[in-house]
Image (spheres, rainbow, N blue to C red):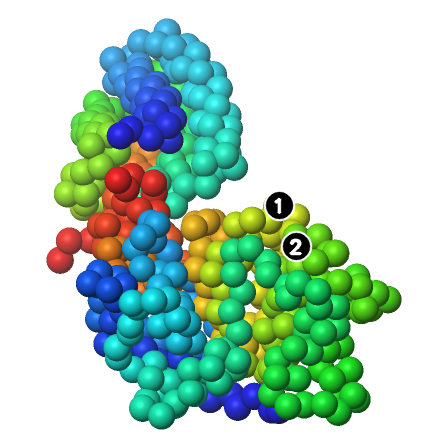
């Protein structure tokens, strides 16, 4: 027998996944605009952020109603608590895509500093993390969520590498500071996106197993 | 009478079994309750939780054809020991039922004093003192102090239930048994009883059967899930309701059961 609660939970999941789809698209547009030097695509990011914000409110509202009316317990309760947190992460991810667009616009308004090599790799890595975090969410796939957690180190290392390289540009020629700084900020935005994907993966593991693996408890040995 | 506070469990049930004729209603239950805690017994209808709780004051064996076997230690004494008088046990361990059952024809005062009088207490000052203390303890005193001679049955349902709690408390029991104490009450009376349970557990160990998951989640420290006469899972309430160990518990408390 399907419970009424199951129908509502399914609606909630669909709403959250729609939001996740917008977030993925926003990250894609923001990073592609930068890599392909197509500043027109940044506008799409702002548009997407508007609908992400709208979903943010709707998902919170749906969770509040479910908590008040259905008094969910056990797995259902964990799931709704996880959704509340994932919702906040997705909204912040939308903001980060917008930040990439701001910084990217500034960067593209000037001649290119250098061919971008690590930044596209980092952007690709982050997009995979986000994709996998959302897939783990859909399928309640703990193994995949764990993989997302393990990927975060790669992203952090790439960010450090980018910082180091750009620092050398800034030291040798102060005229590069503004452009280098914009790229550093973008690397920082991408790193934050990875952190949010990590949070989502942690919440998926919590919802599925009841285990709280945050703050260092979840890395594979 | 001073209550002895000790880390020793107030209630310790060992390998308890109960039958109705040939029907094995309660199977090999081990359970314990620490002082000043509330234990909620949950599970679907017919799972044996009411039968189990009725074994804790030897009420079960009153049903024709019913019997119980095992050990139930109350403050270290086995109430199923040969030679123990079940009537004395029932007098000592009060029970509150689904429907409030004040003694018909008895005044509010006499309802509360009944247990003491049966135990042979006749000293007026002691009776007065105990009735007042018990009614205060049951959060009913302020509502009835000016009409102690009125019949117990003249009170509202929620008040009658608190009167029954006062009656059970009057004999200073180490443990209070409640069998769905709020299922016949409106939400406000229910909330009052639940608040009262929080107060009661400062001094009494409470074991409560409830069909209301949220009530178990709200008021109990530990929860025990019964299914077909067996104790499936017992643990800290916050764990049982957020991350139960057993799949059957999970299915029951999330309403996926049956």
SS for callout 1: loop
Q: Which residue in the rendered view is the most extreme toward the right?
A: B146
Residues at badges 1 and 2 in contact (C-beta under 8 Å)? yes
Q: Give the class, few, some or many, for how many residues have Cα within 10 Å of label 2's Cα (few <14, many ≥20).
A: many
What's the residue at 38%, 45% (across, down)?
Answer: A73
Q: Is residue A213 left or right of residue B91?
A: left
Looking at the image, which is closer to me, A148 or B29? B29
Spot occupied by residue A170 in the image (x, y as percentages of width and height): 35, 36
Looking at the image, which is closer to me, A125 or A213? A213
Quadrant the C terminus of chain B occupies: top left
Looking at the image, which is closer to me, A128 or B195? B195
**From this viewpoint, is residue A103 visible?**
no
For label 1, the residue is B186
Marks 1/2 same chain:
yes
Please tell me which of labels 1 and 2 falls first in the chain: 2
Determine which quarter of the picture holds residue B58: bottom left
Q: Give the class, few, some or many, for how many residues have Cα within 10 Å of label 1's Cα (few <14, many ≥20).
A: few
Q: Is residue A182 left or right of residue B25?
A: right
Q: Which mark is residue B158?
A: 2
Looking at the image, which is closer to me, B107 or A21? B107
Per the model, the C-alpha gap separating discs 1 and 2 is: 8 Å
Chain ID of residue with mark 1? B
What's the residue at 52%, 37% (across, down)?
Answer: A68
């Amino acid at each position: 027998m399907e419970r009424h609660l199951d129908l509502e939970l399914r609606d909630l999941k669909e709403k959250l996944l729609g939001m996740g789809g917008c977030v993925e698209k926003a990250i894609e547009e923001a990073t592609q605009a930068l890599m392909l030097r197509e500043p027109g695509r940044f506008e799409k990011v702002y548009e997407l952020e508007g609908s992400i914000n709208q979903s943010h409110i709707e998902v919170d509202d749906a969770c509040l109603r479910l908590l008040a009316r259905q008094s969910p317990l056990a797995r259902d309760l964990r799931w709704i608590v996880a959704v509340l947190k994932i919702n906040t992460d997705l909204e912040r991810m939308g903001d980060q895509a917008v930040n990439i667009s701001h910084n990217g616009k500034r960067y593209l308004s000037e001649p290119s500093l250098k061919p971008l090599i690590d930044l596209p790799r980092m952007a690709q890595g982050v997009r995979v993390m986000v994709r996998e975090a959302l897939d783990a969410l859909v399928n309640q796939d703990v193994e995949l969520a764990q993989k997302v957690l393990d990927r975060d180190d790669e992203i952090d290392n790439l960010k450090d590498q980018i910082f180091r390289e750009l620092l050398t540009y800034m030291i040798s020629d102060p005229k590069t500071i503004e452009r280098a700084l914009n790229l550093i900020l973008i690397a920082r935005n991408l790193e934050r996106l990875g952190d949010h994907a990590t949070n989502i993966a942690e919440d998926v593991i919590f919802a599925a197993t009841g285990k709280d693996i945050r703050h260092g408890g979840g890395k594979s040995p | 009478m001073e209550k002895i506070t000790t880390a020793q469990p107030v209630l310790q049930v060992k390998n308890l079994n109960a039958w109705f004729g040939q029907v094995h209603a309660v199977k090999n239950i081990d359970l314990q309750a620490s002082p000043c805690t509330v234990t909620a017994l949950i599970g679907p209808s017919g799972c044996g939780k009411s039968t189990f709780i009725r074994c804790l004051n030897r009420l079960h064996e009153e049903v024709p054809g019913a019997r119980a076997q095992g050990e139930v230690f109350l403050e270290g004494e086995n109430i199923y020991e040969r030679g123990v008088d079940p009537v004395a046990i029932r007098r000592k361990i009060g029970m509150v039922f689904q429907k409030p059952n004040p003694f018909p024809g008895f005044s509010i005062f006499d309802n509360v004093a009944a247990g003491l009088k049966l135990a042979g207490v006749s000293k007026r000052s002691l009776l007065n003192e105990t009735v007042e203390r018990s009614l205060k303890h049951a959060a009913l005193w302020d509502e009835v102090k000016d009409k102690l001679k009125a019949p117990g049955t003249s009170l509202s349902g929620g008040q009658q239930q608190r009167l029954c709690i006062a009656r059970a408390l009057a004999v200073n029991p180490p443990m209070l048994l409640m069998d769905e104490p709020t299922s016949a009450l409106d939400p406000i009376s229910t909330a009052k009883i639940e608040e009262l349970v929080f107060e009661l557990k400062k001094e009494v160990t409470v074991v409560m059967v409830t069909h209301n998951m949220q009530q178990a989640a709200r008021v109990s420290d530990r929860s025990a899930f019964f299914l077909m006469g067996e104790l499936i899972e017992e643990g800290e309430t916050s764990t049982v309701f957020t991350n139960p160990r057993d799949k059957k518990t999970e299915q029951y408390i999330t309403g996926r059961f049956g």
